Image: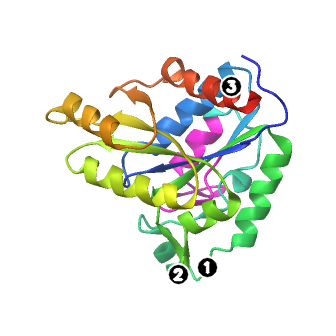
Amino acid sequence: MECPPKRRWPTVFVTGTDTGVGKTHVTAGLLRAARQARLDVCGYKPVASGCRRSAHGLRNDDALSLQAAAASAEPYADINPYAFAPAIAPHLAAAAAGVAIERSVLNRTYAGLADRHDWILVEGAGGWQVPLGPDWNYADWVTEQGWPVILVVGMRLGCINHALLSAESIMRRTRLLGWIANELPPRQAELDANVTALRQRLPAPLLARVKPGRRRLDGALREIFAELCERQRR
């Protein structure tokens, strides 16, 4: 698969219906799928809490997973410019550290990655409207950037309500490219019926169903990039 060098959507934002729904698992799979399709791609985790201390400073496992999936030589600080130790909401972790998350830093770091790569996959934190400061959140920032969104739905009790509310909010602000059903263990009761209910109600296509325990998602998710590239040719 070849994708035109001048893209309509050089960046896709990956959000979830909640925390712990598999955004990193899916984003890393998308990065590997893009690499197998010979696309120049890089992952970006702008803000991460729940980081561990290392000899090189705070490191986040999700950001490291994106860096590895893209086989990126980018410095860690460019992949994850804001890293916080407490596993709490990013704006609270930032406040506890005496740090303000600045749009200018996120924009500058993103611009550098975008200058060096054809595709950027940006992974959010938690859900679509997670705060980044007293008066702004991820939804505000993504809307300003004009990025389209992929919604990861963690298939568990309550996911229909969470998915519909998230999709409604996303579509008021930007384009919802589609959603991915991430099948979480233990298996959701009436899983297939829940997927069907979401397919009937969500105003965007189901891009893939991710089975639990599957480490490599390349085969299922490569089709997403093929479709994105095809849309850019139109």
- Residue 125, position in %: x, y? 49, 58
Amino acid beneath label 2: Ala
- From this viewpoint, is residue 21 visible? yes
- Side of 85 relative to 41 (left or right): left
Q: Is residue 146 left or right of residue 112?
A: left
In 3D space, how far apart are the residues under numbered discs 3 and 2 (Cα atoms)? Answer: 43 Å
Q: Are marks 3 and 1 in contact (CB under 8 Å)?
A: no
Query: What kind of element bears circle 3?
Result: helix
Q: Residue at x 66, y 19 (%)?
A: 36
Cβ–Cβ under 8 Å for marks 2 and 1: yes
* Residue at the disc numbered 2: 95
Residue drawn at the location 41% of the way across and 68% of the way down: 88
Q: Is residue 48 magenta?
A: yes
Q: Which residue is mark 1?
A: 99
So how many labels did they put on this image?
A: 3
Tell me what residue is drawn at x 63 percent, y 35 percent.
Answer: 68
Identify the magenta region. 43-68
Q: Residue type at mark 1: give it.
A: Val
